Image: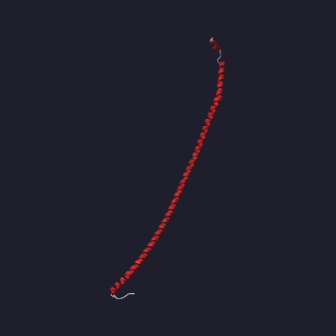
């Protein structure tokens, strides 16, 4: 009899069990679709938003870094050019000061040389005067002795 019931049923026609299982499947599918899928979608959307925000923040950070790097390079170049200008200005001032100091030193040297020459000339003149005062009477005496006039007085 068991063979008869199996042989008499058409497997293509759904029976009551199939319809019950189908309805339970549809209820479970609806529950999953209504209560499980939305939080998963929300989490995925939130994750996608965080990834997009992180990418935007990364791009903005790269732009800020590039701008800061450019400002840094510009500042360094400006500082280098300013330092070069200051070095050149210092060299120019050093040369001018050196020339000025050499000129003053030469003037002082010339003044000292002139003063020394004047002083030496004055000493030489004074020595010549003293020498004449001492030598003139001796020369006169010697001349008198050589000539033999012993008693002639000079005025």
Image spot of residue 140 (x, y percent): 36, 84
Horizontal placement of 5 versus 105: left or right?
right
- Residue sitting at 66 percent across and 25 percent down? 27
In front of the other: 96 or 123: 123
Relative to 79, does residue 36 appear above or below in the rendering? Answer: above
Residue 115, quarter of picture: bottom left
Horizontal placement of 43 versus 127: left or right?
right
Relative to 46, does residue 153 appear above or below in the rendering? Answer: below
In front of the other: 153 or 117: 153
Image spot of residue 83 (x, y percent): 53, 55
Q: How many marks?
A: 0
Residue 14, quarter of picture: top right
Which quadrant is home to the C terminus? bottom left
Relative to 110, does residue 87 appear above or below in the rendering? Answer: above
Camera sees residue 13: no
Which residue reaches farthest top?
1
């Amino acid at each position: 009899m068991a063979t008869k019931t199996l042989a008499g049923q058409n497997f293509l026609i759904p029976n009551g069990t199939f319809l019950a299982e189908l309805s339970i499947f549809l209820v479970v599918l609806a529950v999953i679709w209504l209560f499980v899928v939305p939080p998963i979608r929300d989490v995925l959307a939130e994750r996608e938003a965080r990834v997009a925000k992180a990418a935007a923040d990364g791009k903005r950070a790269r732009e800020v870094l590039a701008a800061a790097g450019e400002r840094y390079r510009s500042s360094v170049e400006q500082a280098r050019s300013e330092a070069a200008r200051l070095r050149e200005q210092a060299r120019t001032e050093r040369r001018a000061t050196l020339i000025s100091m050499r000129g003053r030193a030469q003037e002082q040297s010339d003044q000292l040389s002139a003063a020394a020459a004047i002083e030496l000339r004055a000493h030489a003149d004074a020595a010549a005067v003293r020498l004449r005062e001492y030598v003139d009477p001796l020369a006169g005496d010697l001349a008198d002795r050589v000539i033999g006039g012993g008693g002639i007085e000079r005025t």
